[in-house]
Image (cartoon, helix red, strand yellow):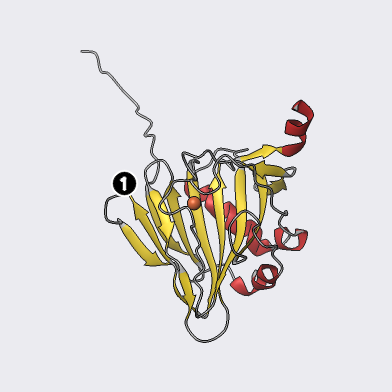
Amino acid sequence: MQKILQTTELEYAFQFTFKKVNSINLEGFKPFFNNLPADPYIKGSYRYRRLSRFIVAEDKLIKLPHGYLYQSKEYNSVVGGVKREFAELEDGLIGLDIFQHMVLAFCDSCKLHPEAEIGIHQIRTTCSSDSFGNPAPEGIHQDGTDFIGIFAVNRENIQGGETHLYTAKKEKPVFNKILNPGELLLVNDHDFFHFTTPIKSLADGQGARDVFVLTSPSLLSDAILDKALL
Ligand SMILES: [Fe+2]
């Protein structure tokens, strides 16, 4: 009798995963969020950001050259179709052990293949007691990438800022939570839409929500190469 042995390699991808990261001391990140340029592509100076792209090779983070961010109108109704450029993350931040640790945790969790490109957005959204800050001005959306990680660094004097995940835009959210400092939400961008509700100050004075958003692929293209082709 013939015996048939079949080995089936399971291919899988997570849909979304929520984690609390205890091994990162967030204090080291905080000074770098006080030195972010305003996002010039949205109305109102309430969002501040930097952006860089990296690959991980043999557990080492390698920064790639400056690029521009491009999303089609299909994915971003507010700034889709616009080539956006942001200042690079600061070298002092990139050199921190906790920064490298955060990126490696994202790569491991997403089972990214070596050399996969990662875009890292460092974003502060601000508000006051009479003006909202909108972390997602484009509304419920997908980014047009494979994997997204939202790592919460700080919530200072704010209410709101709940992160929602949806299987379809008109459905009720399947995930609905304020991401507190040290919490990481990983999302398969193919399967879910995401959104974060506006923030407002809790007490008088400015409020701020600080996050890193990691995506793979990065959605960044080489600015120099593109200019050379024009
Ligand atoms: Fe997004």
Callout 1, which amino acid?
A: Ala
Left/right of residue 222 with respect to residue 209 in the rendered view: right
Relative depth, front residue between 147 and 74:
74
User: In what quadrant of the picture does the N terminus appear?
Assistant: top left
- Secondary structure beneath dot 1 equals loop
> How many labels sit on residues?
1
Q: Is residue 9 visible?
A: yes
As drawn, the residue found furthest toward the top would be 1
Determine if the C-beta at disc 1 is less than 8 A from ligand 1.
no
Q: Quadrant of residue 47?
A: bottom right
User: In what quadrant of the picture does the C terminus appear?
Assistant: top right
> Which residue is located at x 56 percent, y 52 percent?
214
Q: Quadrant of residue 48?
A: bottom right
Q: Position of residue 136 (x, y in %)?
A: 48, 58
Q: Position of residue 2 (x, y in %)?
A: 24, 13
Identify residue for label 1.
168
Left/right of residue 72 with respect to residue 220 in the rendered view: left
> Which residue is located at x 60 percent, y 71 percent?
26
As drawn, the residue found furthest toward the bottom would be 204
Relative depth, front residue between 203 and 4:
203
Q: Is residue 58 visible?
A: no
Rate crowding at label 1 as few (under 14), some (14 to 19) or many (20 or more) other CA atoms within 10 Å. some
Relative depth, front residue between 134 and 23:
134
